[in-house]
Image (tube, rainbow, N blue to C red):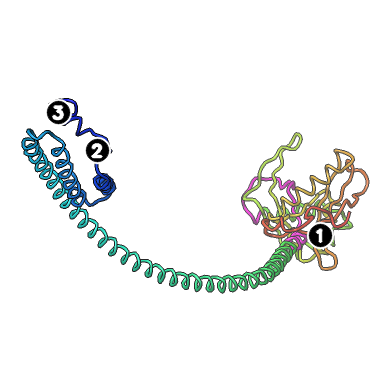
Amino acid sequence: MSYHRGRGIGEKGRGTNRDRSPEQLREIRGVRRRLAGDDLGSIFGSLSEVMKREMETVVGNAPRDIQATMKAGMNIMVKAVEEAMGKITERNWREGEQMKERERRLQEQMGKLEEKVLVLEKEAEVCSTQLEEKVKRVEEKLIEGMEKVRGIEEKMEEVEGHVELVSDVTLGLKVAESVKQMEEKVREASLALKVVNMDLGLETENKAMIVRKVLGEVRRKVRQEDAGQVDRVLRRTRVVVLGKRTEGRKVGERTIWTVPILFECLDKKDAEDLEWGLRGGGVFPTVHWPDEIMDFITSIKREVREGSSGQGSWIKVRPVEGVGQVRIRVETKFNGVGRFRVRGEWACPPLKKELWTEVKGLFDPIRG
């Protein structure tokens, strides 16, 4: 009994390796190694064998009077452990099978997925090749189109140069033609004389009466030595009444009745002879300029006036013709003293005012 107290079951269960045989120690180490693996059934089987041998060793070392009881109790314990390990093994097996099934299905799905990926890769490769070919064809067409565009641009530049040249020529022709039209109007104006301050002595709107009064007044005013020449010119001259009726105008202490009159002469010589006769009789005619040139006349008169030495200068503007070109001549006389002196001559502007900006140096005199 002293043995039982000195080395009880619990103490024997916690015995050191020196109480086990070398074979038992190798088996224990083998179990420990297998515990690191996945085969629990094999591990638990080996463990059961070890437990049985351990139990035999423990029982064999116990006192004889309690060996039977210890063996029975330990058998029950071993069976309980075996049942628990069996359940664990079965559950582990089922889980392993389920895991294997999941892995099999996963591998099957992965295989199908890999097949699909391979198919997609092949399709992508085919599409990429086709796309590269299409891009290449598009690039070739684009290069071809750019070459055509470049050729068209070169032709357009060439055409634009011709168009610009033609445009310049056309514009120049338009300007020249418009100038000729203005010259023709000014030439016609040079054959006419306008009188605005002749006193006809009565208020009337009878045009025939006004014309008779005008002719009588002119013949009465001209000097004796000019009468014959003026009379011959008047017989060839058309008298035009520019107003509707005579209008009263206050001159000094008396009222005169007058209306603008236009003498349309047959030619330039008749116009010069008539103007000479009228001026000799104290009547000072002016030019009946076309409306289209009035702004031009106003501008050059202002320019001449600003350049004159005195504010009282008289300015006379007359059309002149030379070498087939009608010009505008400006003459001045200071305070009516002495003779008129030529200040300059200007070329006629285009008849269409929108073309004036196309004429370089339009307001610069061509002589002066």
Residue at point 72% right, 61% down?
Answer: 182
SS state under label 1:
strand
SS state under label 2:
helix
Q: Amino acid at mark 2?
A: Asp
SS state under label 3:
helix
Task: Choose between 259 and 180: the one closer to the eye.
Answer: 180
Check disc 2 and report the residue beneath it: 19
Residue numbers of the magenta segment: 185-209
The relative height of residue 317 versus residue 255 in the rendered view (above or below) is: below
Residue at point 71% right, 63% down?
Answer: 175
Q: Nearer the viewer, mark 1 or mark 3?
A: 3
Check disc 3 and report the residue beneath it: 4
- In the rendered image, which quarter is residue 32 located in? top left
Task: Choose between 32 and 198: the one closer to the eye.
Answer: 32
Q: Residue 233, position in %: x, y?
A: 79, 63
Spatial CA distance of label 1 from label 3 is 159 Å
Q: Amino acid at mark 3?
A: His
Q: Using the rendered image of the protein, determine whether residue 227 is visible from the camera's viewpoint.
A: yes
Q: Residue 139, position in %: x, y?
A: 53, 70
Check disc 1 and report the residue beneath it: 327
Q: Residue 66 has which mark? A: none
- Label pair 1/2, CB-CB below 8 angstroms: no
